[in-house]
Image (cartoon, rainbow, N blue to C red):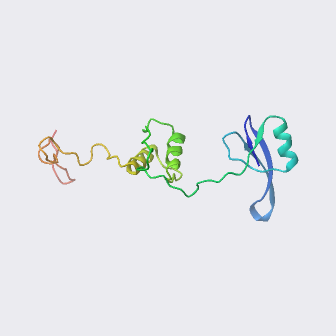
Amino acid sequence: MIRIISGTVGVCMTAAGHGGKFVRLTVYKTSRDKPFSLSAEDEERLVGRGVAEYVTAQPTNAGAVIQPDDPGEEKPEYSVALNVTVLRDLMKAVGLKTPVGMTKAAMVAALDEFYGVAPDGEDSEDEDGEDGDEEDGELPPVGAADPVTI
């Protein structure tokens, strides 16, 4: 098993295509990809050229979920200003799922929920303990039948 450490390597694969026909594909591997296996000759050639390195199988914590109250677990700094990839990595590190199409705001909200951070502006109380709903300067709702004057 090898891992790419430098550059990009094209790996030719054969897969079943539409209608049962076999299709030849080229899959490009970089240092960001997970380790993979090739034939012994191909692995030796790539390692010899300094493009890849051998890796040994290591036990993983695939099913482990980190709890926020674990000793030594601090809440990382995150916001919608971060890159999507960084937010996804933060979510994966604590065992949260990142479905395709999830927005950065939704990722931040999920991380806030995980770490127990209350969202800003919701159910905030005024200085006098009131929730601020009555007479706070909001306009009344206007319906289609209501007259509007300008």
Could you say where residue 49 lies in the image, as x and y percent from the top left?
83, 35
Q: Quadrant of residue 48?
A: top right
Could you say where residue 127 lies in the image, as x and y percent from the top left?
14, 40
In this view, the residue farthest toward the bottom is: 20
Query: Residue at the location (50% across, 55% down)?
Result: 65
Q: Is residue 125 left or right of residue 33?
A: left
Query: Residue at the location (15% across, 45% down)?
Result: 132
In this view, the residue farthest toward the front is: 71
Q: Quadrant of residue 126?
A: top left
The residue closer to the viewer here, 15 or 46, is 46
Q: Is residue 4 left or right of residue 117?
A: right
Classify the position of the C terminus by image quarter.
top left
Q: Is residue 2 left or right of residue 68?
A: right
User: In the rendered view, would you say 91 is above or below 83?
Assistant: below
The residue closer to the viewer here, 107 or 39, is 39
Query: Residue at the location (71% across, 40% down)?
Result: 30
Could you say where residue 141 lies in the image, as x and y percent from the top left?
19, 50
Query: Residue at the location (56% across, 58% down)?
Result: 63
User: In the rendered view, would you say 82 is above or below 103?
Assistant: above
